[in-house]
Image (cartoon, rainbow, N blue to C red):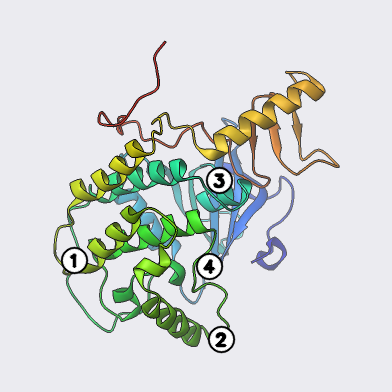
């Protein structure tokens, strides 16, 4: 929803809960909008989500409960406020730590292809995160599709309650999306959303795993076949799945240094900026430029990103794998 539709005053007039000023809109969805905000007392930048109080399907209350339950967990943003806006009291507001660009933003930044090394390092971290879950929903059928249809598991399409196997299957589709640039069931046309979901499901069922993964290492087919073989309440063999990808990483002689594709692009862009303008230049959305954001001559991130991306995405608790070649300390 555009900012005009939400009737958000521009400039410094809109102060949420007497503490956070809205700066600009940085995202939107069917629920409402996301703004860059700033704490007027500390100048800390935050992410501000807004939805109308009388929204047909309110989400922020439930989202805030989930985040609060997960507070203190590595990689989970800190919730700073949930309540009404305190200005016109027309909106529910959720304020949280401001994070960097999404993987989709970075994917576009990298030309909509990730290298095998980047995909394998991402897969390892996502598998590590999934293996930390221990409580699960009871088995049910006739469930509505939850999540993005592009990455949904076959069972999810079929209306079966999701469990760990479905998370892992979705992760496999994400990996193939990053490697291929797209998935076979993207771009399908339909009159209604329900019909589109049905077409995606049909295409997904008819696309054999070997066909989906053709031209890529067998480890990806092995991974997806394992995911689809699991029972609803079966504990996935996380050790096997991680070793599957780590062994491929080692076979390809990659170095586990957390240097992702976007890290290299940022470094190259930084060097070019320093050569052209000097090391201390600071510009934002320079006219005539590519729309990238340059900060102190050292980092370039996608235009519209909400915060500078670190050179890695590793959790503070996620140690370097000991079974994979490491960068030299010399």
User: Of callouts 1 and 4, which one flags the residue occurring earlier in the amino acid sequence?
Assistant: 4
Mark linked to residue 190: 2
| Closer to the eye: label 2 or 1 | 1
| Closer to the eye: label 3 or 4 | 3
Tell me the residue at 81%/23% (across/down): 277
Viewer-side residue, 41 vs 242: 242
User: Of callouts 3 and 4, which one flags the residue occurring earlier in the amino acid sequence?
Assistant: 4
User: Of callouts 2 and 1, which one flags the residue occurring earlier in the amino acid sequence?
Assistant: 2
Q: Mark 4 and mark 2: span between their CA atoms? A: 23 Å
Please tell me how crowded label 2 is: few (under 14), some (14-19), or many (20+) other residues with Cα within 10 Å.
few
Residue 189 coordinates in the image, percent (x, y): 58, 83
Please tell me how crowded label 4 is: few (under 14), some (14-19), or many (20+) other residues with Cα within 10 Å.
some
Callout 1 secondary element = loop
> Relative to 161, does residue 123 appear above or below in the rendering?
above
> On the image, numbered disc 4 is attached to which residue?
31
Q: Are marks 4 and 2 in contact (CB under 8 Å)?
A: no
Mark linked to residue 86: none
Mark linked to residue 101: 3
| Closer to the eye: label 2 or 3 | 2
């Amino acid at each position: 929803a555009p900012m005009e539709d939400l009737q958000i005053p521009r400039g410094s007039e809109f102060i949420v809960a007497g503490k956070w000023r809205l700066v600009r809109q940085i995202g939107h969805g069917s629920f409402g909008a996301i703004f860059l905000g700033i704490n007027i007392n500390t100048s800390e930048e935050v992410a501000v989500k807004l939805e109308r109080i009388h929204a047909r399907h309110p989400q922020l209350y439930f989202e805030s409960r989930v985040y609060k339950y997960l507070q203190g967990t590595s990689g989970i943003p800190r919730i700073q406020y949930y309540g009404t806006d305190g200005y016109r009291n027309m909106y529910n507001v959720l304020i949280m730590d401001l994070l960097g660009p999404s993987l989709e933003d970075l994917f576009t930044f990298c030309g909509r292809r990730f290298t095998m090394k980047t995909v394998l390092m991402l897969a390892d971290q996502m598998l590590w995160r999934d293996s930390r879950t221990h409580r699960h929903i009871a088995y049910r059928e006739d469930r509505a599709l939850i999540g993005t249809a592009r990455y949904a598991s076959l069972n999810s399409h079929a209306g079966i309650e999701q469990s760990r196997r479905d998370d892992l299957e979705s992760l496999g589709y994400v990996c193939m999306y990053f490697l291929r640039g797209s998935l076979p069931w993207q771009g399908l046309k339909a009159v209604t959303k329900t019909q589109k979901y049905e077409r995606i499901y049909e295409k997904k069922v008819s696309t054999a795993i070997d066909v989906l993964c053709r031209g890529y290492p067998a480890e990806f087919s092995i991974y997806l076949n394992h995911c689809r073989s699991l029972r609803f309440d079966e504990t996935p063999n996380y050790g096997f799945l991680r070793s599957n990808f780590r062994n491929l990483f080692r076979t390809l002689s990659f170095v586990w240094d957390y240097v992702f594709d976007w890290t290299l692009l940022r470094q190259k862009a930084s060097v070019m900026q320093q050569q052209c303008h000097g090391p201390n230049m600071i510009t934002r959305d320079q006219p005539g430029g590519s729309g990238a954001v340059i900060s102190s001559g050292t980092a370039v991130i996608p235009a519209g990103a909400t915060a500078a991306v670190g050179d890695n995405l590793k959790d503070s608790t996620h140690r370097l794998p000991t079974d994979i070649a490491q960068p030299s300390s010399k």
